[in-house]
Image (cartoon, rainbow, N blue to C red):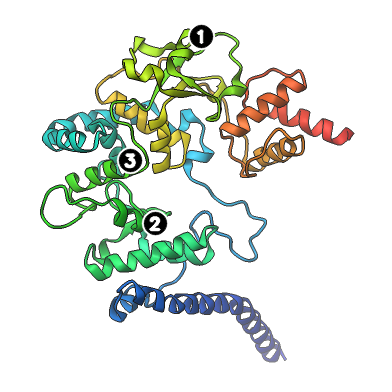
Amino acid sequence: MARVGNCATILVSFWLALAAATPARAADAAFQKWLEDLWPQAQALGVSRPTFDAATRGLEPDLTLPDLAIPGREGVPPRGQAEFVQTPADYIKEANIARLAGQAKKLAAEHARTLAAIEQQYGVPGNVLLAIWGRETDFGGYRLPKNAITVLATQGYYGRRKDMFRQELLYALKMLEEGQVKLADMRSSWGGAMGLTQFLPSEFYKYAVDFDGDGKKDIWRSVPDALASAAQQLVGKGWQRGTRWAYEVRAPQGVDCTIGVPEVTRPLGEWIKDGFVLSHNRKPAAAELNEPASLLLPEGTYGPAFLTLKNYYVIKEYNFSDLYVLFVGHLSDRIADPRPFETPWSKNTQLRTAQVETMQRTLTKLGLYKDKIDGKAGMLTRSALGAYQKANRLKVDCWPTAAVLDDMQRKAARN
C-alpha cells in the first residue's frame, strides 16, 4: 500500500507540475508566434531570412526587465529607472561626479582635436558630450548587460510601449543585416539602447555619424563617431549653440515653489532682477539674458535651485529624467570647474512609489494635478503638492512627505 500511495503522490505531483508549466508554455508559444509574425515587416526593411533566423532562433523573453505589463502580474508595481526612485543625493553622488570629472579631463586632452571639430560643426560643447559618455557607459568601461534583440523583443511583446519597441526591434534586425554591428556585440541597457553614448536603433538611423572617416558609423568602438552622433542627436532635438544647459541659483527667501514648472517661463535676466543670484558668481552671456528660463526645484524648497534654459530640455529628450539632466549638466561643468553645487542636497528621503501614487490620485480628484499617475515626484507633482499645502495651511515646501500624505488620508477618511 505504501508503494501505491507513493506512486499516487508522485503522479499527482507530476500533473500539478505539468499544469503549472502549461501557462508558461502557452505564453512562450504565443511569443514565438509573435516573433514569426514580424518576418514580413523585417523582410520589407531588407532583412534576409538567414539574418532574421539567426537573431530570433531560440529567443526567450527576459521577464526580469522593468516596465513590463505581464498578464497575471497586474497588481505588481513596475520597476523603474534609478532616476525615478532615488533622491537627488543618491543619484548625483559627489564621489561619483568627482571621479568621472577626473577621467573626463584626461579624455578631453586626449580627444581635444576631435571635440573641437565636433563643437565647431554642431555647436555642442565637448564637455557636454564627455558627460553623456561618462554617465551612459562610464567612458566605455561599463559593459552593457543585456542582449539588445532579447530586450527589444521582450519590450515589444510584454512592454508598456509595444509599438515603439516592435519598430526598434525591426531596425535592430536591419542593423544586423547591413553589418553595422555583429549580433554578439549588440549589447544594450534594459531599454535597448546601445553603444558608447546609448542609441536606440531608430536613433542610430536618424543621427549616427561617421566622424572618423573610415566608412562606418561605429557608435560601439569609435569615440569620434559616438560623440559626433550624440552631438547630432542633440542638435536634432533643438540644441542652441552658445547657451548653457542651466544655472544653479540662490532663490530669494520665501520663493513660491509652485512656480517650479516648465510652463512658467521668463527671460533669464528678469529672474535675476527679481533676486535670483547665480551660484559661484557665474556670469551669463549677454544673449542668454533674453532666453526663456524656468525654475527647477528638484527637492522643493530644499537643496539646490536652478534656472533652466532650452538646452536643459534638449538633454532631457536624450533621457527623460530631471536627475539625469542634472547629473550630465553638473558633470559637464565639473570637467572645467572643480566646485560642487553651491547648495548641497538635503537628507530628505523619498516616499515609496505607491505612496506617491496615492498622493497623485488625491491631487487629481482635487483638480490640482492633471498628469499621469506614476508614483514619481516630478515637477508637476511637486507643484501640485505645494498648491495642496497652501490650500490646507500646511508648510509649503513642494516635497512629498509622510506628514502631507497623512493629512490627505485624514481628510479623505472624514469625507
Residue 131: quarter of image = top left
Residues at marks 2 and 3, CA–CA distance in whole angstroms? 19 Å
Three-letter residue code for mark 2 = Gly
Q: Give the residue number, with chain letter if any, for mark 1.
A: 274
Residue 192's disc number: 2
Q: Is residue 383 visible?
A: yes
Q: Nearer the viewer, mark 2 or mark 3?
A: 3
Q: Earlier in the sequence, mark 2 or mark 3?
A: 2
Does 212 appear above or below 106? below
Q: Residue at x 60, y 10 (%)?
A: 254
Residues at marks 1 and 2, CA–CA distance in whole angstroms? 44 Å
Q: The residue tagged with tag 1: helix, strand or loop? A: loop
Residue found at the very far right of the displayed protein: 414
Q: The residue tagged with tag 2: helix, strand or loop? A: loop
Confirm or deny contact between disc 3 and disc 1 (CB under 8 A): no
Name the quadrant of the C terminus: top right
Q: Residues within 10 Å of mark 2 (few under 14, many from 20)?
A: many
Does 185 appear above or below 261? below
* Percent position of residue 119, x then y: 21, 34
Q: Nearer the viewer, mark 1 or mark 2?
A: 1
Residue 234's disc number: 3
Q: Residue at x 31, y 24 (%)?
A: 333
Confirm or deny contact between disc 1 and disc 2 (CB under 8 A): no
